[in-house]
Image (cartoon, coloured by chain):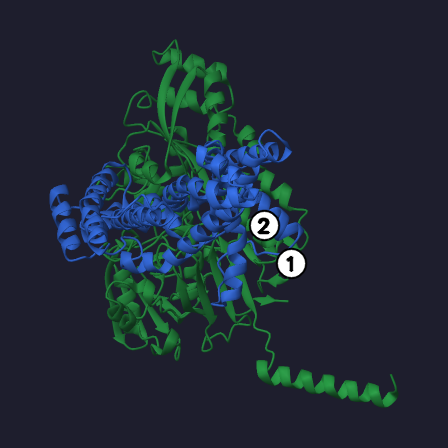
Chain colours: A blue, B green
């Protein structure tokens, strides 16, 4: 398995480089100026020109690109043009927040979405199915910012159970978990809807299969048929969906992070985009690519566990 | 329960309480002011390197200057000593000598403030490589420290308000030379000042925490800590206040917001100066606004009263002049262009546009978005079609500085002396594209003579006359159409007492001082 993992990671290198290069040029094509962002709109032209020179933005584009490649060779993602702090340090600081939020959302979606989907499939065209289908449709259609505000109004204002500011000042782990629940639910509800629909479709596909019929004919209980035979095969698309959605959720987390005042990768990338922090944008692209590659790799490995027919070579 | 039983139970309860108290330590009520600001992160804690509101607000709590405005005011006539205890100027106004207050300490043990630190700071503030405000200091010839408690500034030519340049704001803030050299260009990490609060913790994208400066020369602040949180979503700040998680927060400059929030229990809405003047700058360097008749046609098409009604009478002050209300040298005795769309049409016809004109305008997606529609509608009535392209805010700032918009709607406030505003917005040297460009989007040059003359005029009365004349000329030539001054709008808990009356603040945010308390 190790050579497989190593090969996949090596293959990711050109992808990361290509993505970062595209972002390098795209960011510089966009109108906007990091120097103006830093100094503010009341700054004089002289100060803006001087800062552009200090940031190396007065150099020809090709020279900037060569410098960027050289720093990558040294495994250096550079320092933020705005804060001056190393990109990696900023990423390491916020990454746990994004991972915990995404993992919470995925766990929330899988734990509630899979049973909901299975129940809907087993009770096809009956009340549980209608409830599950309408619920997942609402969940998928609901904009995250709207859902977030609704949850805040209900659970932070009317029933003051959770904080509005979901990034506690102190380091108390309990406070951090409590603060994670509402943003996690916001992101998780949308994923739940997606998982419920996928699980229902997958179950509806496997339930008429001959092996399920055979299992019933063997005299197995309905529980054993559903969970022992049908579910196991229906799980494969759920694993695919979860793997794919991990990256999407990390990207979608930005709205949740802004409304709940949480730090995170999404907020970092939007901030970098707004302030034209080119170095941060390039670094974050590489980090995102690496995470997506890693998640895809883990998904492939999980396939092998779920379905013995899939072998890792 | 018998009496003995009750006593026993009471004794056990007292013992348990004592044990808990011993375990948790003595209960101390630490007073923390929790502030919510609208940005996603601090731009810079280096006071010379940022002109953004989000930074300016917190700089004012950390840093000091040679002189300052008394908290809650921005009246240049009331400037008072800060790090300097006294000052004197030569008869020709070219040499200013400041005597430093003895014993003032920098934060975190960086030692006593010396004249060397002040000289270093003022030179730093005037250097375009280290300061966003370098152009403010163009008249400086020399800054010297004849002895550790004396700072001498020699000017090339008199300036309207030298004290304004060395006030605790923008390039006038004093930093520690030692800390700056240690920081190696990253002053945000140090942020060593002399103000009532000192940097305790900076958690990027989350908050800056300040602790009371125990050695503050005006006395230790009454609140122990200030946590300055970045909460970019407007709704989240409102909700966080309602949930009791904030004591002070950045509001919205909208009547709707004021009306909606007024009924929130325990909330006080502070509306204060300086007003930021909203100007419609007409780009005289390009057609059709190179023709004064077209510019006047636009002026007659604008109904200022409608704008004031739209944005909200509680948060804006109508202003007919091109300098914010109340600045030294301000006048409202300027030409008024009555709202008269028919007259606009006649002027356009006279200028050779009988079928009206079409103008292309770049607008920011973050500022004035809704009022743009009102502007479009008003102009349309006069036969002026405004093709508006709303673009991302950062891109907009960049594009308008490349002279790509025929009309620029801009809002700003500066040090409350007419000279700075007039110079930056209406002097030809500040025009976009010039080496010393600032924000003259209209390429106005009609009042250069008056602005230059006022700057070196020694007679205060004559100086004010010249500024008044400059305003009249600029309005008359319609370089820009002033709409209104937008005041600063913040919300605070009724339990938070600033310790002073808040009428205006040069940092655009309330001052939290050594007198501020939280009940």
Q: Which disc is residue B431 wearing?
A: none
Which percent across, then down, holds residue A244?
Answer: 37, 41
Residue visible at 41% across and 15% down in the picture: B347
Which percent across, then down, holds residue B13?
Answer: 73, 83
- Residue B316: tell me if it is visible: no
**How far is the residue under mark 2 from the one under mark 1?**
16 Å
Residue visible at 53% across and 54% down in the picture: A181
Depth check, front residue: A249 or B178: A249
Say which chain tag 1 marks: B
Disc 2: CA contacts within 10 A as few (<14), some (14-19) or many (>=20) = many
Q: Secondary structure at mark 1?
A: loop
Q: Give the quadrant of the N terminus of chain B.
A: bottom right
Question: Outermost residue toward the front?
Answer: A218
- Residue A22 lies, with reference to residue A98, above or below; the image says above
Can you tell which quarter of the image residue B215 is in?
A: bottom left
List the residue tagged with mark 1.
B494
Can you tell which quarter of the image residue B194 is in?
A: bottom left
Foreground mark, 2 or 1, reads 2
List the residue tagged with mark 2.
B239
Residue visible at 28% across and 54% down in the picture: A80
Say whether residue B301 is left or right of residue B189: right
Depth check, front residue: A286 or B462: A286
Disc 1: CA contacts within 10 A as few (<14), some (14-19) or many (>=20) = some
Which percent across, then down, holds residue B390?
Answer: 39, 30
Depth check, front residue: B279 or A274: A274
């Amino acid at each position: 398995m190790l050579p497989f993992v190593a090969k996949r990671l090596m293959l990711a290198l050109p992808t990361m480089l290509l993505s970062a290069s595209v972002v390098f040029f795209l960011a510089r094509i966009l109108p906007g100026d990091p120097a103006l962002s830093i100094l503010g709109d009341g700054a004089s032209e002289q100060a803006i020109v001087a800062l552009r020179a200090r940031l190396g933005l007065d150099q020809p584009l090709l020279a900037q690109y060569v410098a960027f490649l050289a720093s990558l060779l040294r495994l250096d993602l550079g320092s933020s043009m705005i804060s001056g702090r190393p990109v990696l340090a900023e990423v390491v600081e916020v990454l746990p927040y994004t991972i915990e939020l995404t993992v919470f959302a995925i766990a929330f979606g899988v734990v509630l979405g899979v049973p909901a989907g299975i129940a809907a499939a087993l009770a096809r065209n009956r009340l549980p199915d209608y409830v599950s289908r309408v619920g997942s449709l609402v969940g998928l259609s609901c904009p995250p910012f709207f859902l977030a505000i609704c949850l805040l109004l209900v659970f932070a204002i009317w029933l003051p159970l959770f904080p509005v500011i979901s990034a506690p000042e102190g380091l108390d782990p309990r406070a951090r978990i409590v603060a994670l629940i509402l943003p996690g639910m916001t992101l998780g509800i949308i994923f739940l809807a997606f998982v419920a629909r996928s699980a229902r479709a997958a179950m509806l596909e496997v339930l008429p299969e001959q092996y399920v019929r055979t299992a019933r004919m063997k005299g197995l209980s309905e529980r054993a048929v559903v969970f022992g035979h049908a579910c196991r095969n229906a799980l494969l698309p759920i694993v695919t969906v979860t793997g794919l959605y991990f990256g999407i959720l990390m990207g979608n987390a930005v709205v949740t992070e802004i409304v709940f005042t949480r730090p995170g990768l999404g907020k970092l990338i939007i901030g970098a985009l707004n302030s034209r922090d080119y170095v941060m944008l390039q670094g974050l692209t590489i980090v995102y690519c690496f995470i997506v590659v890693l998640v895809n790799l883990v998904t492939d490995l999980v396939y092998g566990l779920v379905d013995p027919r899939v072998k890792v070579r | 329960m018998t009496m003995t039983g009750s006593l026993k139970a009471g004794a056990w309860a007292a013992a348990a309480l004592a044990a808990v108290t011993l375990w948790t330590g003595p209960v101390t009520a630490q007073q923390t002011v929790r502030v919510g600001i609208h940005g996603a992160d601090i731009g810079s804690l280096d006071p010379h390197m940022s002109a953004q509101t989000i930074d300016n607000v917190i700089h004012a709590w950390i840093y000091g200057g040679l002189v300052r405005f008394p908290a809650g005011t921005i009246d240049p006539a009331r400037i008072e000593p800060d790090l300097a205890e006294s000052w004197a100027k030569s008869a020709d106004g070219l040499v200013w000598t400041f005597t430093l207050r003895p014993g003032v300490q920098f934060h975190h043990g960086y030692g006593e403030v010396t004249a060397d630190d002040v000289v270093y700071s003022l030179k730093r503030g005037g250097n375009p490589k280290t300061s966003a405000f370098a152009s403010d200091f163009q008249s400086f010839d020399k800054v010297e420290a004849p002895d550790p408690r004396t700072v001498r500034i020699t000017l090339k030519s008199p300036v309207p308000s030298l004290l304004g340049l060395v006030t605790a704001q923008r390039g006038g803030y004093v930093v520690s030379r030692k800390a700056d050299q240690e920081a190696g260009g990253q002053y945000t990490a140090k942020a060593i000042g002399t103000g009532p609060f000192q940097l305790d913790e900076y958690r990027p994208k989350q908050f800056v925490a300040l602790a009371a400066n125990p050695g503050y020369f005006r006395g230790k602040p009454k609140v122990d800590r200030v946590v300055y949180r970045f909460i970019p979503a407007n709704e989240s700040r409102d909700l966080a206040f309602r949930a009791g998680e904030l004591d002070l927060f950045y509001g919205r400059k909208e009547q709707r917001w004021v009306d909606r929030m007024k009924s929130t229990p325990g909330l006080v809405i502070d509306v204060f100066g300086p007003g930021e003047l909203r100007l419609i700058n007409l780009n005289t360097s390009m057609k059709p606004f190179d023709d004064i008749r077209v510019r006047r046609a636009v002026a007659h098409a604008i109904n200022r009263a409608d704008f004031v009604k739209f944005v909200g009478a509680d948060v804006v002050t109508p202003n007919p002049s091109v300098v914010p209300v109340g600045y030294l040298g301000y006048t409202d005795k300027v030409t008024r262009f009555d709202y008269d769309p028919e007259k606009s049409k006649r002027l356009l016809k006279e200028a050779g546009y009988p079928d009206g004109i079409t103008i292309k305008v770049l607008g920011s997606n973050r500022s004035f978005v809704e009022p743009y529609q009102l502007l479009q509608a008003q102009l349309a009535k006069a036969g002026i079609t405004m093709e508006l392209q709303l673009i991302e805010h950062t891109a907009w700032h960049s594009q308008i500085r490349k002279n790509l918009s025929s009309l620029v709607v801009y809002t700003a406030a500066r040090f409350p002396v007419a000279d700075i505003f007039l110079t930056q917005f209406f002097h030809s040297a500040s025009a976009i594209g010039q080496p010393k460009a600032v924000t003259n989007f209209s390429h106005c040059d009609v009042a250069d003579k008056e602005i230059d003359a006022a700057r070196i005029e020694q007679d205060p009365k004559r100086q004010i006359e010249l500024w008044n004349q400059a305003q009249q000329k600029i309005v008359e030539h319609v370089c820009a159409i002033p709409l209104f001054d937008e005041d600063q709008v913040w919300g605070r808990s009724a339990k938070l007492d600033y310790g002073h009356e808040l009428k205006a603040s040069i940092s655009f945010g309330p001052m939290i001082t050594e007198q501020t308390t939280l009940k």
